Image: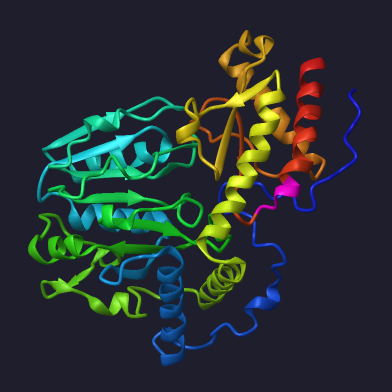
Amino acid sequence: MPDKPTRRPDRPHFSSGPCAKRPGWSTKVLEDAMVGRSHRAKPAVARIQDVSDRSRRILGIPDDYRLGLVPGSDTGAVEMALWSLLGARGVQLLAWESFGQGWVTDVVKQLRLDEISKLEADYGALPDLSQVDFDRDVVFTWNGTTSGVCVPGGDWIPDDRAGLTICDATSAVFAMELPFEKLDVVTWSWQKVAGGEAAHGMIALSPRAVERLESYVPPWPMPKLFRLTKAGKLNESIFQGSTINTPSMLCVEDALDSLRWIEELGGRAAVQERSQNNLAAITRWVEKSDWVDFLSRDVKTRSCTSICLILTDPWFQEQTPEKQTSLAKEIGSRLDAEGIAHDIGSYRDAPPGLRIWGGATVETADIEALLPWLDWAWACVRER
């Protein structure tokens, strides 16, 4: 049995969602939460609006974009956009991992639109972005959470596009620079880079998206939780601190704590740097490794948040797919049992390997302490 490393991460939380809380977090940050009060009460509405206002300032969202809190985490926000906006013109769906494929399934099988095209790629790569048809509405993830592959900025998106761009940015926002002027709908949740709690989503709408909402009525029934309009006009109250349904004021308070932490660090540039530092630490280790590599094939599209690794050792490659999956899971299980790293297995639909969250709430020192343990766990599996 190989010798165990002596240094341990202070926090073994490397899950890709929900993600680690910010350093120093405790339940004391929730003491002023507006529990026991109506979410319609003025102080509660002000708290909810404060989340939007701070998010807007930190992310640099244009003043003429609407920003609001919606139900159902990022999934709810994306579904709201798809059901409310699509159908006015053709749609093109980009997918290169599980969540992008999920939006393909929903549009094709649930909305059943006629004019659908798809641009797809295998895990580890991007579709050919030069083939995107911006005369259509375009739906895509900014960062593939299950593949560790992100789009390389926004230069591929034209300013004079005819269709809308609908972007699921949940594992990118705060950690990666988003060109909001090229994105008509942006969705995310608090549970990723900000380390907040689940169940609530955020949606940002450009003036072009608002115009679509007020000029187009989808032919299908609209569930209450997806309704962004009222009497043919945008329901502005959603973007002024009110919500479609009852939010958790504990989660709202926790989100405010995360946003204050980001502000204290120095804003989005500071948290982006933290995520990049985490990716850099893993990159240095991978470059010296003889058994692991990044799933992302192109360094320009490599995620600094959902850092996905594959096992490249020749012995591992000789195993059956079932055996490969079992061996990769055993690495994660050993580290979990040691209290070194929780929840670092690759996503169930992704190639067998490891997925380490590198978002800003994870300390680089903990990443550096984890890496020798990965070597240890692999050695245990390889020699067994």
The residue drawn where x is 30% and y is 36% is 94
Q: Is residue 383 left or right of residue 24?
A: right
The magenta segment is 362-366
Residue 172: within the magenta?
no
* Label tally: 0
Camera-side residue of 298 and 37: 298
Q: Which corner quadrant holds the C terminus?
A: top right
**Protein image colouring:** rainbow
Residue 317 makes an appearance in the image: yes
Give residue 91's position: percent from left, percent from top. 17, 42
Camera-side residue of 199 and 292: 292
Give residue 254's position: percent from left, percent from top. 57, 72
On screen, residue 37 above or below 109: below
Q: Is residue 187 left or right of residue 374?
A: left
The residue drawn where x is 42% and y is 90% is 41
On screen, residue 10 above or below 306: below
The residue drawn where x is 25% and y is 52% is 82
Give residue 189's position: percent from left, percent from top. 46, 59
Residue 359 makes an appearance in the image: no
On screen, residue 14 above or below 184: above
Q: Which corner quadrant holds the N terminus?
A: top right
In the image as oriented, which residue stretches furthest toward the bottom?
A: 42
Q: Quadrant of residue 201?
A: bottom left
Camera-side residue of 183 and 311: 183
The residue drawn where x is 70% and y is 45% is 342
Predominant SS of the magenta segment: helix
Q: Quadrant of residue 5?
A: top right
Q: Quadrant of residue 173?
A: bottom left
Give residue 279's position: percent from left, percent from top. 61, 41
